[in-house]
Amino acid sequence: MYLWLKSLHICLALSSAALFAWRLGSSWRGRRSHGWQRWAPHLVDSLLLLSALALVHLAMPWPLPRWLQAKLGLLLAYIVLAAFALRSRRTAPKAALSGLALAALSGIFWLALTKPWW
């Protein structure tokens, strides 16, 4: 069960990152999402969070390890930064928000791959 859930979580995380990059590129070109392009990222992100909760329930001790706490903090920062980046106009703040959102996403992936001892 754990390995299946972990594989699903990894697949959803990669899909979520790809959908964010695609939506960000569309946003920079001034295109708006319609139909499945509007609801698919939210569905993938919801399933990603549910799989994360299930993994924590199955395999994590309490209190959560610090690397996982940092990952959760970066996730909250990523959600806020990505929302502002996707909604802002084509200006310098949009570029800064986009860069910070991508940096937070990179930090999330780094923590997931390395799981530092702290």
Image (cartoon, grey):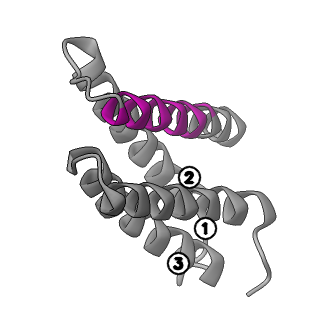
The one nearer the camera, 81 or 51, is 81
Crowd tier of the residue under label 3, counting other residues whose Cα lies within 10 Å: few below 14, some 14–19, many 20 or above: few
Mark 2 and mark 1: Cα distance apart in space: 7 Å
The one nearer the camera, 73 or 81, is 81
Q: Which residues are magenta?
A: 11-28
Question: Total number of numbered labels?
Answer: 3
Q: Residue 106 falls in which quadrant of the image?
A: bottom right
Q: Is residue 32 left or right of residue 28?
A: left
Q: Residue 84 falls in which quadrant of the image?
A: bottom left
- Residue 21 among magenta residues: yes
User: Quick one: label 2 or label 1, which is nearer the N terminus?
Assistant: 2
User: Quick one: label 2 or label 3, which is nearer the N terminus?
Assistant: 2
The residue type indicated by label 3 comes to Gln
User: Quick one: label 1 or label 3, which is nearer the N terminus?
Assistant: 1
Q: Residue 34 falls in which quadrant of the image?
A: top left
Circles 2 and 1 in contact, beta carbons < 8 Å: yes
Q: Main secondary structure of the magenta part?
A: helix
Q: Residue 69, labelled with which disc? A: 3
What percent of the width, then of the height, locates residue 30? Answer: 26, 29
